[in-house]
Image (cartoon, rainbow, N blue to C red):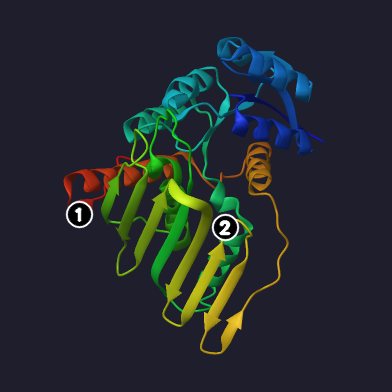
Amino acid sequence: MRRLNVAVIGCGFWGLNHARVFKEIEQARLVAVSDVDELRAKQAGSKYGVDWYVDNDKLLSRGDVEAVTICTPSSTHMEVALQAIEAGKHVFVEKPLASSASEAYEILKAARRKGVRLTVGHIERFNPGVRRVKGLLEEGRVGEVVLMSSRRVSMWPVRIGDVGVVKDLAIHDIDVMRYLLNKEPVEVYAVAGSLRHSYEDYAHIVLRFEPREVGFIESNWLTPHKVRKLVVTCTDGLITLDYITQQVKIEDSSGIYTPSYTWQEPLKLELQSFIEALLEEKPFVVDGVDGYRSLCIAEAALKSAFDGCVVRISFEA
C-alpha cells in the first residue's frame, strides 16, 4: 500500500493533534516535525518517534517529505507556506490561510506557479453534522433556504493574538455558509468591537446572498460557556445543528425528527481526505481559493464594522 510521507510544522496544541492523527491514518507516514521552540519540537519528535527540527529549511530540504501541514501562528502562515511551496511540497495550512487576504492571494499564486497543491483547514466542512445538513438541503427535505443563523461563542483568556474573533471564529461559519449554499455572498454588514482583547472579541455579521438567502453569524470570546450551533430556516421547516455533538434536528409541519448518527472526529476525516486526495490525485474538498475567499469575506465584514456601512464583496481569484 502506498503511503504519503508528511511532516507537521508547528508543535503547539493543534500541531500535536495533527501529528497524533497522522500516526493513526494508515495511508500516512509521519516523518518529521518542527517548531521554533526547541523544547516543543524535541518533545513532539520524541512523543511520536520522528525526526524533529527547529529550522524549517532543514525539514523542507528532505527529499522524502512529500507534504506538510502548517500549524503555526496566522501571522507566519505566508512565510512558512511560501517556504514549503518553494521546496516543492504539497501544503495544508490551518485556517485562516494567512493573516490577510492579500497574503493569502500571494500563497495561492505561488502554489499555482510552482505546481504544488494547496488546501486550507476549514475543519467544519468535515464535521459529519454539516455534511448531513448539506445532504438534507440538496434533497429539498425542508424546502429552499431562507436564512442561516450561526452562534459560535465561548470564553477566551486575554492573550497576545494575531487575529481577532472574525478571522479566528466567524470564518468557520462564513465557509460553512458558502459550502451549504454553493455560492458566494454579495454584500456584508457587520458590527464588531473589543472589550477585553487587542483585536475584536465580538462580532455580528449579516451576509446577503442572491437571490434572497441571508446568513447571520454571531461570534465572541465573551460568553462563559462554549456554544457552536447552526439553524437553517427553510420554506418548509428548519434544520438545527449542534457542531459539538454533531446532532441534527429537523422540524416541519409533521413534527420533530432527530436522525441517529455516529460521532466522528472531524480532524481525522479532514486529514484523511487530505492524504487520499494527494495519493489518488483527487480534488481537495477545500482548496486555496476557498481559503482566500473566506478571508476576503471576513475582511469585508471588518471593513463594514469599521466604516459602519454595507460592503460589497469582490475577489481577485
Q: Nearer the viewer, residue 6 or 158?
A: 158
- How many numbered badges does the structure rendering display? 2
Residue type at mark 2 is: Tyr
Q: Height in image: 216 above or below 65?
A: below
Earlier along the polypeptide chain: callout 1 or callout 2?
2
Q: CA distance from mark 1 to mark 2?
A: 29 Å
Instruction: Residue at 47% x, 67% y: name it.
Output: 231
Q: Height in image: 224 above or below 75?
A: below
Q: Height in image: 180 above or below 168?
A: below
Instruction: Residue at 44% x, 34% y: name it.
Output: 158
Q: Nearer the viewer, residue 196 or 161?
A: 196
**How far across and how far down the image is residue 275, in percent?**
67, 38
The extreme bottom residue here reads: 254
Rendered image quadrant of residue 107: top left
Instruction: Name the residue tied to disc 2.
Output: 243
**How far across and how far down the image is residue 99, in percent?**
38, 31
SS class, disc 1: loop
- Asked if one can make out residue 62 in the rendered structure from this viewpoint, the answer is no
- Horizontally, residue 216 falls left or right of residue 39, namely left
Instruction: Name the residue tied to disc 1.
Output: 310
Front position among marks 1 and 2: 2
Instruction: Estimate how packed mark 2 is, as few (under 14), some (14 to 19) or many (20 or more) residues with alpha carbons within 10 Å.
Output: some
SS class, disc 2: loop
Instruction: Estimate how packed mark 1 is, as few (under 14), some (14 to 19) or many (20 or more) residues with alpha carbons within 10 Å.
Output: some
- Quarter occupied by the C terminus: top left
Instruction: Residue at 62% x, 24% y: name it.
Output: 11
Residue type at mark 1 is: Val
